[in-house]
Amino acid sequence: MEANLLFWKSRGQSFVSRLQIWVDLLDPFSLLCSDVEIQKAHARFEAGGNVNEQDGDTLTLSLSSVHADSADVLPLVFRPPAFLPVSAPVVVASFLPHSTVKSALFWQFLLQSYSAGFNHTNRNSSCEQGRKTSLKKLLFIGGTVTYATCAGALPQIFINRLSLRTPQIQQFFRFILPIPLSAALAFFNVFMVRSEESETGIQVFDSDGNSVGVSKAAGQKAVRETALSRAALFGTTAAVPNLLLLQLQRTRLFQTNSLLLAPVRHISLALVFGLMIPVSFSLFPQLGTIQKESVEEELQAAAVDGRLFYHRGL
């Protein structure tokens, strides 16, 4: 088992501990480190095993910038610390009300493309033969992005094409519909981009960290958990600001000063999204467990303590 996974096995089994770790790992200043520094930090981490508090930089660089299956340095824009600074402006822009369908499609395309890239980069790649992504996989990801982009722009398409001008109907399409739609598309993006893990399986480990085989059941569980965590992230990001604005619009202050709605929307979107990132990353363990009864029969004998471990991905 890779050193990063051993760390998550020893310290990341409770939600509170995972949340504390992710708050530290998402520090964007780690993006300033070069690939050489990251590789050296990961080598020190592997050589030293469990690190002390003084080795915080080594630990942060290894966990936040190195893939737990391949031990490769992650691309800069798809590292967990880059998720907030890169995607926050796109998330805010895509969740804002648009005047045209083209603008809605544009921002949805950027959001779904980055999400697909992040999901693919941080997948479980333990059973992949080569390091390069196949043309078939790239086309599949492109199809997922295209579908999610069109679906994400549906509220604006309905408003424009059906000439919906009634305030109550516009409120539904601008404030209510985006909440379940954002959660569903986030789930869909992860589920489709990482569908190969469900079909071919991922490596599972015994309690000593030894690889015991490949499990489709573990792959399905890993993808499902990650998809649910991403749905919670984007669903909450859409729900809290939208429901807040619906309430504020009824107050006298915002009825007489409608220009205040825009900054409140921007700030609340960015704030909720930023707060929800470490929470959503912490919902499920990075090193997940699957019960003996849930894995394939040929792997059940290896689960001497009644469970096996797998890398969930992110």
Image: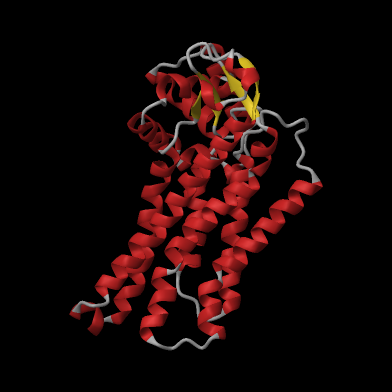
Quarter assignment of residue 52: top left
- Image spot of residue 294 (x, y percent): 54, 27
Q: How many marks?
A: 0
Residue found at x 51% / y 47% = 83
In the image, residue 27 above or below residue 293: below
Residue found at x 36% / y 82% = 168
Q: Is residue 221 visible?
A: yes
Q: Nearer the viewer, residue 192 or 110?
A: 192
Q: Is residue 109 visible?
A: no
Q: Nearer the viewer, residue 106 or 54?
A: 106
Point out the image quarter for the N terminus.
top right
Position of residue 62 in the picture relative to residue 195 (left or right)? left
- Image spot of residue 16 (x, y percent): 33, 32
Position of residue 5 in the picture relative to residue 198 (left or right)? left
In the image, residue 166 above or below residue 262: below
Residue found at x 53% / y 51% = 187
- Image spot of residue 165 (x, y percent): 44, 88
Quarter assignment of residue 56: top left
Q: Nearer the viewer, residue 142 or 300?
A: 300
Q: Nearer the viewer, residue 142 or 203?
A: 203
Residue found at x 60% / y 23% = 204
Q: Residue furthest left?
A: 252
Position of residue 255 in the picture relative to residue 273 (left or right)? left
Q: Residue furthest right?
A: 135
- Image spot of residue 172 (x, y percent): 40, 75
In the image, residue 67 above or below residue 244: above
